[in-house]
């Protein structure tokens, strides 16, 4: 029998898919969502691991998209034991040059969907006195992040929200954990238009999404407040984040996010 039911947003690829795979191997049935066409392939991979999987193809940057996903969660007829609120998107480039609509989409997806979906999840879990929530933030949430200003700000929002919500729920039986990956070998940098940067080439090789997901799951089950994942460099940068001056962090990030042609 399954351990329980878990939902993962942004589960068609990258960290989200790997989180779903970890949950499947740990015996959870799944509700997975993504806007992308790769969701069907992800479902096949997850079912091969023995999970019962419900997929919801929906745009979580829109209110109706989040409601569609929640309706599927309610239709399952079972309470959620784990919610991995993971869907997100990024954008590289200087703020003066980047498209406003793309940045508003970042805010709608990374922040809006996070709050909207979490509201449903928390209202279901708290009366039961049980449940675990994992928010995918980023190490960028604690950085000065030129050329990813809106993305980093959105993840700072997610991190702050996760920490505050964790405190609010500390006596309810519901735990909240923030997953803070560093550069990871996914298609994030390609979608963000950052292939031609140090972050999008050698930087992302520092961590594998499967390692990030496994560390995130273990931190979630252990009830930790957050985890820097997955490579040593990411963990070191996280540990030093509050001690390194903002000017230094900004210079480091700018070097990683700057197009190679500008160096």
Image: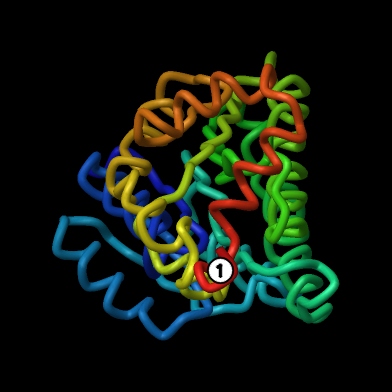
Can you say whether 47 is above or below 30 in the image? below
How many numbered circles does the render carry?
Answer: 1
Q: Position of residue 237 (x, y in %)?
A: 52, 28
**Closer to the camera in the image, 26 or 151:** 151
Q: Nearer the viewer, residue 73 or 204?
A: 204
Residue at 57% x, 34% y is: 178
The local crowd at label 1, few if under 14, some if 14 to 19, many if 20 or more residues have their Cα within 10 Å, is many
Image quadrant where residue 16 sits: bottom left
Residue 167 x/y as whole percent: 74, 20
Query: Which residue in the rendered view is the most extreme toward the bottom?
Result: 37
Q: Secondary structure at mark 1?
A: loop
Q: 75 or 122: nearer the eye?
A: 122
> On the image, which quarter does residue 49 sit in?
bottom left
At x 55%, y 75%, the residue is 193
Residue 255 spot, x, y in % from top left: 58, 51
Rendered-image quadrant of the C terminus: bottom right
Q: Is residue 64 above or below residue 89?
A: below
According to the image, label 1 marks what residue?
259
Q: Residue at x 73, y 41 (%)?
A: 144
Given the current orientation, which residue lies at the most extreme front position?
A: 263
User: Is 208 placed left or right of 228 in the picture?
Assistant: left
> Residue 23 vs residue 63: left or right?
left
Q: Quadrant of the N terminus?
A: top left
Residue 138 in view in this figure: yes
At a point 43% along the width and 61% down the height, the residue shown is: 31
Protein image colouring: rainbow
Q: Is residue 122 visible?
A: no
């Amino acid at each position: 029998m399954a351990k329980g039911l878990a939902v993962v947003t942004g589960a068609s690829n990258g960290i989200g898919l790997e989180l779903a795979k970890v949950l499947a191997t740990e015996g959870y049935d799944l509700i997975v969502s993504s806007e992308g066409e790769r969701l069907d392939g992800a479902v096949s991979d997850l079912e091969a691991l023995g999970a019962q999987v419900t997929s919801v193809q929906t745009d979580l940057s829109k209110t109706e998209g989040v409601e569609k996903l929640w309706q599927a969660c309610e239709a399952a007829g079972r309470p959620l034991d784990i919610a991995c609120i993971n869907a997100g998107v990024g954008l590289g480039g200087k703020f003066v040059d980047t498209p406003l609509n793309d940045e508003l989409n970042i805010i709608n997806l990374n922040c809006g969907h996070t709050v909207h979906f979490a509201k449903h999840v928390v209202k279901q879990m708290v009366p039961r006195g049980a449940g675990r929530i994992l928010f995918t933030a980023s190490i960028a949430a604690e950085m000065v992040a030129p050329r990813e200003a809106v993305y980093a700000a959105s993840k700072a929002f997610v991190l702050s929200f996760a920490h505050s919500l964790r405190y609010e729920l500390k006596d309810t039986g519901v735990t909240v954990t923030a997953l803070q990956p560093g550069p990871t070998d996914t298609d994030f940098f390609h979608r963000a238009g950052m292939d031609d940067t140090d972050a999008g080439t050698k930087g992302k090789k520092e961590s594998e999404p499967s390692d990030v997901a496994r560390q995130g799951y273990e931190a979630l089950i252990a009830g930790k407040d957050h985890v820097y994942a997955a490579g040593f460099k990411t963990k070191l940068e996280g540990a030093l984040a509050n001690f390194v001056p903002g000017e230094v962090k900004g210079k480091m990030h700018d070097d990683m996010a700057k197009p190679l042609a500008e160096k």
